Amino acid sequence: MEQIFLAIYNFFKRRRQTFWAVFVGTLVLISWGASRIELEEDITKFFPDDERVEKLNYIFRNSKFVERVVVMVSMKDSTSQPQPDSLVAFADSLVVRMESELKPFVKKISAKVDDQKVMEVFNSIQQALPIYLDEKDYKQLDSLTHPEVARKVLQNNYQQLISPSGIVTKRIIVQDPLGFSFLALKKLQQLQYDENFELYDNYIITKDHRHILFFLQPAYPPAETRHNSEFVEVLKNIVDETSVGHDQLMASYFGAAIVAVGNAQQLRSDTIITLSIMMILLMVVILGFFRKKRVPLLMMVPVFFGALFSLCCIALMQGTLSILALAVGAIVLGIAVNYSLHYLTILRQEHSAKHVIKELAKPLTIGSTTTVLAFLCLQFTNATVLGDIGLFAGLSLIGAALCSLIFLPHLVREDLFVGHKSNARVERITSFSFESNKYLVYGILILTPVFFYFAGQVEFNSDMSKLNFMKAETQAAQVRLETISKSSLTAVYVVSDGNTLEKALRRNEQTMPVLDELKRSGLVTKVSSVSSFMISDSLQQVRIARWNTFWNDSRKEALSKVVHEEGETLHFSPRVLQNFDTLITRTFKPISSEDAQSLRTAFFDDFIIEKDGVATVITLANVKPENKKAVYQQLERTPAHGVDRQMMTNLFVEYVHSDFNFIVTFTSILVFVALLISYGRIELTLITFVPMLITWIWILGIMALAGIEFNIINVMISTFIFGLGDDYSIFTMDGLQQEYQTGKKVLSTIRTSIFLSAITTICGLGVLIFAKHPALRSIAAISIIGIVCVFIMAQTIMPFLFRTLITNRTAKGFTPITLLSFFRTFVTYSFFVGGALLLTVLGFVLKLIPVGKQRIKLFYHTLLKACAWLVIYVEPNVKKRIIGLTPDMFARPSVIIANHTSFLDILLTVMLHPKLILLTNQWVWDSPIFGGVVRLADYYPVSEGAEDSVERLRDRVKEGYSIVVFPEGSRAADGKIKRFHKGAFYLAETFQIPIRPLLIHGASDAIPKGSFILNAEPLTLKFLPAIEANDIRFGEKYSQRTKEVSRYFKEEYKTLSRELETPDYFAKRLISNYIYKGPVLEWYMRVKLRLEKNYIPFEKLIPAKASILDMGCGYGFLSYMLQFMSEERTITGVDYDEDKIATASNGYLKTDRLRFFCGDATTFPVEDYDVIIISDVLHYLTTAAQDALLVKCFLALNPGGMLILRDGNADLKERHKGTKLTEFFSIKVMKFNKSENELNFISGKKIRHLAQEYGMKVEEVDDTKFTSNVIFVIRKIAS
């Protein structure tokens, strides 16, 4: 990846004008694109995409219930005598001023019940009276038609006319003497949702006459805080000024617009304060570290570029973006700052843009990719705004990463920090080895299970109101309103909709019988509906027909007679009596659209929504919380559906919880897979990923213990924390890998960069702890906890794991641990420990049996042999081979002597036969795991010498047991056979039994001393011929036999080693030298070894004792193999590529016999070598350079030495095409090799001619089929 960005850098470096044209052009283009985006302010996009939520959101967006501001005129002292007239006077004063001063901000002020509108409603009702009467009304109507009842009603109405009652009532009686219309008018009470209110002087007043309520309909929706801020300010001035002189009264107001304005004002105030603090802190940190004034500006270039890039892309993709997503997503740009911070921190050390790009390209690319994928996971959540946040954040990071790697290197001078003094304080902190502090590591390991236990107890705060800021007076108004009317807390919206108002009304009418039934059963306490007045056309026709059926001719005539007689008696005017006749004789028609609109405008507009071709009728049901579930179940029988705020909250919590779990799970999987692809090793992926996992456990555990709850805001911030942790982990891993691969100490620089990132991020988000707004404050808490945890885990657990599993082992010469070797070790040790414990228990049980001791002991030894065999053979990938074992070998006792280099030696010998007694060291005898087995098997410790064991062993020898002795006494750490002790030979002489040498090969490689990991190395056991007690070839006395047998044993072991230790044997060891140094390098090495046949052709050509020069050694594959094959070789590797030489020089298997130098083959000094290897190098040189190099090598060879030249033979025309193709991939595609010249393949003829010219002898080794690569062995004739 770095090669691509280096190529771009080099291109622009040579073409400065082109760079500025591209940079400015790109900036202009994305700025123009960003300007085309349309920002949305819809708060409901926070909520999940669910049909029920959509319905409720639709109601909230379009119903005037939600937007209304309630103004309350109240008594200050709730215990004082009610003063309703004073309340009315105060309310009148307020209304007058509001009508005058709030015109630009308020559509409508609903203060008093308008008598004129009541009369209009009455006229509309009277014109279509039958339409508003149902069957219950006809029961009362039937009663009114009885003569006595009719006379009594007329008398009562007459008293109303002559009394000082309301003018509206008198007008209604004049038009309708018997008051039939009151049957319909009283249904207006159904719209009174709370029964705690009544009318007083046309104001809505509580029944205790202590509070008057009226309503303001704002001209702007609550989200339009800019306009509503002016509205609230004017409203506050009116209330404050009008309150003067009304000492016992108070006015307050509450509504969505009021809360929204308070939120916005507090957010602005908090933003100014926190931004000021943040800028001061950031300036102190950044300028204090870099000490360059331009650095803050340079740091922000990728951030602004990324934001513009993201907005431009979103404008092209979807055209709109939630302003909420922009606001929250902007916080995530804190990650983008890290990219430029990393660049500048590394530049401060390197002073070379190329070096910075080279070091930064891989971790930044991997880090940004995984973080972007994590944010893009938000696209799959249920809330639109979360998807917008993820898209904006992800695209911003892509833009910032590209800007940091492509444009920033040309905007920052390479010498910006030349002569810059280091910051001692920061470097003291970053040079601290977190992973080496055992208290810190053990503390994390101990606390992690504790935090894991509490992590599941973190709660989600489902109360969205707690994320709002409310001033004290707004909170008091809310409490007062809830005290006055608690109905709003249990409101269920029963929604009936259709593509026309007629359909919606029909569905509402079909729903009302169910609601009436629920009301009768007590599940619903109150229903507020327009069903009695907004009636469908079909039902109007039915009710008109019912009216006509009721008023038959006889009923009309009889009632008219009674009314006229009684009316004349009471001196009703003829006009009033005529009005009655007209009412009962007229022909009624369905209500006209004008009258229907008049009714709707006067009283029912709040209950009906018509928008975008959909009509919705809303019925409000007052339901106790415990009855809601039953009510919703009953509503399923109707064409309507119920929704309420609590349902939205419950769904919101359900979806957010589901989304959060999805985000964590899916993001984790995605990041894990991305890391696995990037690193190519499951082990490195786990080392990188585990700290992220532990970080989450710590964050959740600390939140649970501190009582910090999740909410919709800090849930999104948690994604940011995950992205930050992802970046920190990847950069730390890159530093650890670089140190392991090249030995270059870059971790301190990376740690400095990460430390500054953590400090700046805490400054950016942590300062929100000073904010008063609860949403901002919740961001601060989780941010501080998260960033601190992320930093500590990335700098402690990851290096600790890396060093424990890899570098600490390689420093001791052990192979790094792989997942396969760990699993192999775990399985093997599980069998071993399990078998040891089982044998210990069985041994004690068998010891209790009083008879057959010898048979029991043999049985126990048989079990011991089987267990040892199982442990050795349980791992199928470890090859086992036993040479020289015959069936009758253990027919007579002997002393078996074996070399001792590994713990496995014990198991390898025990598995051979049941009749074996081992002489062991004291630690084996005292082992808590298998010490019991050793003691029960009659194995003997020889810490005090073999002489003391003679008598105890004599009986065992008589019973046919052979004695196994490791004459070295202890394991050899280097795998070499040490001096033999005399004990084994003394025992053999004493008991007059043969000595049977046993060579154990491979055990020291499988489990070397000091290591517990089992490597998949082949194990070979070879029995040498027995040395009889009377065999004087090795001496007569045990002292002399000790020396001679030791010499013989070592020679045979060397012979066996030469036989077994082939290049194929060392291939795995060579691979282990290069794992964890990058997937490309590892797989390149594996492929290279396969193509080179593990370098067997070279090994066959090169003598075991030689000084060797590997010219063009690359990563040192061949050089290491030659080192493994003989301890008498000294190898010098040279390559033009300093990165390859750094990798080769830092192999953990490198010894003093192997050296690497970075140099040009044409200028590197060459002299006095037995063997010079030039493999796949010559074609990178010019023809003249080729000739000069060959001549130089000819002259530098020692007499009898050889030049091994492997290159493409230009004479082999057809096969040469294959060679050219492989070189194309090597240089142009995979970038493994570098070339400054055109490729020049030399011909075999020229090589032979040049060799002959210098008196050299040439041999050709041609064993390839598809390429022209030929090995020329050019020997210098010994003088």
Image: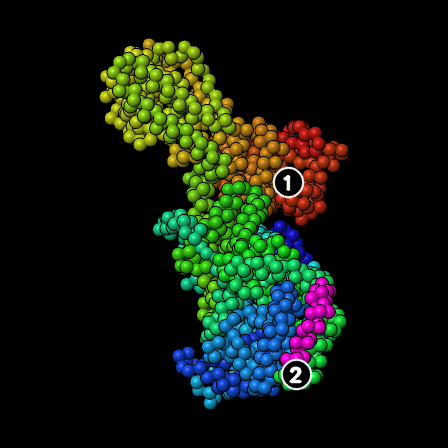
Decide if residue 368 is in sight here. no
Q: Secondary structure at mark 1?
A: loop
Residue 992 placement, left or right of 513: left
- The residue at the point 41 percent across, 14 percent down is 1025
Please provide percent x and percent y for residue 793.
Answer: 45, 52
Q: Is residue 424 above or below residue 220?
A: above
Q: Assess whether residue 1108 is covered by the magenta stretch.
A: no
Mark 1 crowdedness (10 Å alpha carbons): few <14, some 14-19, many ≥20: many
Please provide percent x and percent y for residue 966.
Answer: 35, 24
Mark 1, residue position: 1177
What is the tally of numbered marks visible in this picture? 2
- Residue 203 or residue 127, whichever sits in front: 127
Q: Secondary structure at mark 2?
A: helix
Mark 1 or 2: the one toward you? 2
Q: Please state, as top left, top right, bottom left or bottom right, where the C terminus lies in the image.
A: top right
Decide if residue 79 is in sight here. yes
Give the main secondary structure of the magenta stretch.
helix
The disc placed on residue 1276 is none
Q: CA distance from mark 1 to mark 2?
A: 131 Å
Residue 1208 placement, left or right of 1015: right
Q: Which residues are magenta?
A: 541-566
- The residue at the point 66 percent across, 77 percent down is 563
- Residue 1269 or residue 240, whichever sits in front: 240
Please provide percent x and percent y for residue 176.
Answer: 66, 78
- Residue 632 or residue 508, whichever sits in front: 508
